Image (cartoon, rainbow, N blue to C red):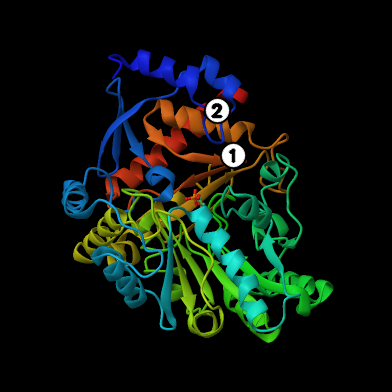
Amino acid sequence: MPATPSDLARLDRDHHLHPFTDPKVLQEDAPIVMAGGKDSTLWDEDGKLYLDALAGLWCVNVGYGRTELAEVAAAQMERLAYYNTFFKTTTAPTAALAAKLAELMPDGLDHVVFANSGSEALDTIVRFCRLFWELKGQPDKKVMIGREEGYHGSTLATISLGGTLAMQAQGGLPLAGFAHVDTAYQFRHGAPGESAEAFAERAAGWIEEKILELGADTVAGVVVEPVQGAGGVIIPPPGYLARVQEICRRHDVLFALDEVVSAFGRLGAWSAAERFGLAPDFMALAKGLSSGYQPISAVMIGSRVAETLIEKSGGLAHGFTYAGHPVAAAVALANLQIIERENLIGRVRDDLSDHFAAALSRLADQPMVGEVRSLGLIGAVELVQQRDPKILYDPEGLVGAVVRDQMQSRGVIVRAVRDALVIAPPLVVTHREIDRIADTLRLVLDDILEQIG
Ligand code: PLP
């Protein structure tokens, strides 16, 4: 291993192309080489400390430095480092995790398909939506509907399903068979004076209009993130998700929730489906499933689809070498035990979510802040050039990136999505750390305001 942090940065710069990073920029700005972590704190190879207000990529729910999870991984590797789940084999942790997920997720979601990443889980959902209708004798039901700013992963199908135009612009996407509607983003799309309830109804209507425009006999499924994370923490207005589910049912279209970010406590419940009383046909799980300690994801499959796949498929021609990997499954199980034992979900629901909302709300009077929003332990502070009437920054995203970088220099990691600073700390974050995130953001914004006069 190279000795110094600058050696590491140089090797990385010379040989590593990073996701969602301009390689040219990295030629000049050395990457930060992260070295270790404990709870919500990270440190880099130079010894600088950071408060990780994004829990990695909204995944390290139980926080860093859980020796217990390392021990579980080592023990499983010694016992059986790998075996597959193809054909007719399984392993003890894989079987136990499947049963545990069926127990934790809402009734009716009793079957699971394992994969290794959120992207693979969503890709699987696209495929199984189409397969379900083929098995039902309706092979023309193929189109998948996603939403503006939706993020479902980085494979060809998930980029096509998502609504991130910058991703679609690279590689000639979307593929055929995907359609998109505007999302329930009231800050952008709400009419003046419109209530959240009225907006929810109107925004859900866009999905129904799209189904009618395409013809329900061509639409396989609708996929939504309950809270859109990478799109800028877009929180659904009251009643929206239930209305979308009802529209899907009425038009005989499958309803899938991408719970890659929202499950395992982020919203103060095991899942958004539980929190909002939803019964989706599919649910994608990843990130908090193992708190990022191992790559693992899962698709929960509702009873109607599961019965059809079991009765009629004649065998699922689908699977990944590492799906249900025993080490990842063992770590995921132990991670779920930590969430239960430490009551992390109750902590978010009954304590942290209010403190978090109050801390962010204190920023609302800062002149650059156009909106503050949060649900559970995920939130955003959206910046505007002028609040009333609302004028967004043009071009979008420059100010957000400056704020993010200045936060990072002051030792607090957040992410900028356009000009929204998005925040989702580990579920073990303390009140003081939440206050520090909000106080640092205020300092940075006040500084910038002073500089631009
Ligand atoms: N779905 C959502 C909602 C996500 O936020 C992400 C990743 O951030 C994905 C899917 C893709 O997951 P992965 O990066 O593990 O492929």
In the displayed structure, would residue 350 be above or below residue 431?
below
Q: Is residue 359 left or right of residue 315?
A: left
Instruction: Please state the horizontal and vertical placement of residue 163, each as a whole percent of the image.
Output: 68, 53
Instruction: Please state the horizontal and vertical placement of residue 350, each as a whole percent of the image.
Output: 31, 67
**Which quadrant of the figure contains the C terminus?**
top right
Q: Is residue 171 left or right of residue 27?
A: right
User: Tag on residue 368?
Assistant: 1
Nearest to the observer: residue 18 or residue 308: 308
Instruction: Please state the horizontal and vertical placement of residue 129, each as a whole percent of the image.
Output: 61, 72
Instruction: Please state the horizontal and vertical placement of residue 358, each as a whole percent of the image.
Output: 41, 55
Residue type highlighted by circle 2: Ile
Q: Residues within 10 Å of mark 2 (few under 14, many from 20)?
A: some
- Earlier sequence position, callout 1 versus callout 2: 1
Q: Is residue 346 left or right of residue 25?
A: left
User: Tag on residue 126?
Assistant: none
Label 1 and label 2: CA atoms lie apart by: 9 Å
Q: Residues within 10 Å of mark 1 (few under 14, many from 20)?
A: many
**Which quadrant of the figure contains the N terminus?**
top left
User: Tag on residue 448?
Assistant: 2
Nearest to the observer: residue 399 or residue 370: 399
